[in-house]
Image (cartoon, rainbow, N blue to C red):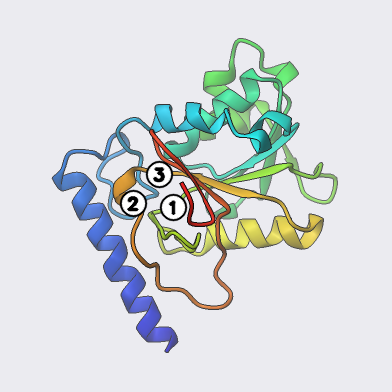
Amino acid sequence: MKDEISKEKEELRGKIWHLLEQKKLAIFPLPVFGRIPNFEESDKAANLARTLPEWVKAKVIFANPDYAQKRIREFALKEGKILIMASPRLKHGFLQIDPQKVKGKEKDASTIKGAFRYGKSVEEDMPRPDLIITGCVAVDPLGWRLGKGGGYGDIEIKRIKDQFGEIPVLTTIHPLQMVESVPHLKHDTKVDVVVTPEKIYRGGNS
């Protein structure tokens, strides 16, 4: 069963990556294969996410390091929210960026290099995030997410929830990344809110 699900996941990833490139909807960094895809109007999706009540009241945001969510990390810092960012493949754990220390440099601080430049490594002394931002290759209406295959997104979400309890999870995607069903196992994680450039989905409702 596990091998079968893994094969189905890999096939779905390949389908989404191919579709985004074929329709010229994938944008820098390219090629999109093997990545959390950045997509046309990802900035617009990030801007729409800012209208959510979970976002408005959040003082601490945890986010994945992928380029597709760079803009939402920048918005967090510009709005004075503490940003905790996962390092790529979690090789250096989590990085905390103080918005007060990067005023005028939010664009740079929201990148991976900038997070290392301006942030500090945190683990046990990390503040509780009010919202988790994750990247996805695909999502289904029930919230099951498909990452790029390394398992790091699931690890990040689980580590935060194991430490702090339930926290809402949000992702930004292109509409083509919303699929009918994502193959999953019990240990896989879900998202609570899906934001495209035009719509917000919650628990299967738009």
The residue indicated by pointer 3 is 173
Tell me whether circle 1 and circle 2 mark residues in contact (CB < 8 Å).
yes
Distance (Cα) linking label 3 and label 1: 7 Å
Disc number at residue 177? 2
Q: Is residue 201 above or below residue 186?
A: above
Q: Residues within 10 Å of mark 1 (few under 14, many from 20)?
A: many
Q: Residues within 10 Å of mark 2 (few under 14, many from 20)?
A: many
Tell me whether circle 2 and circle 3 mark residues in contact (CB < 8 Å).
yes
Amino acid on which the number 1 mark rests in the picture: Cys
Q: Is 167 on the left-hand or right-hand side of 193?
A: right
- Quarter-of-image position of residue 96: top right
Rendering coords of residue 203 (x, y %): 54, 56
Q: Quadrant of the N terminus?
A: bottom left
Tell me whether circle 3 and circle 1 mark residues in contact (CB < 8 Å).
yes
At 36% from the left and 84% from the top, the residue drawn is 4
Q: Residues within 10 Å of mark 3 (few under 14, many from 20)?
A: many
In front of the other: 101 or 144: 144
Query: In the displayed image of the protein, which residue is found farthest to the bottom?
Result: 1
At 49% from the left and 63% from the top, the residue drawn is 142
Q: Is residue 55 above or below residue 164?
A: above
- Quarter-of-image position of residue 179: bottom left
At 68% from the left and 29% from the top, the residue drawn is 56
Amino acid on which the number 3 mark rests in the picture: Ile
Distance (Cα) linking label 2 and label 3: 6 Å
Dot 1: element: loop
Disc number at residue 136? 1
Rendering coords of residue 43 (x, y %): 42, 27
Dot 2: element: helix
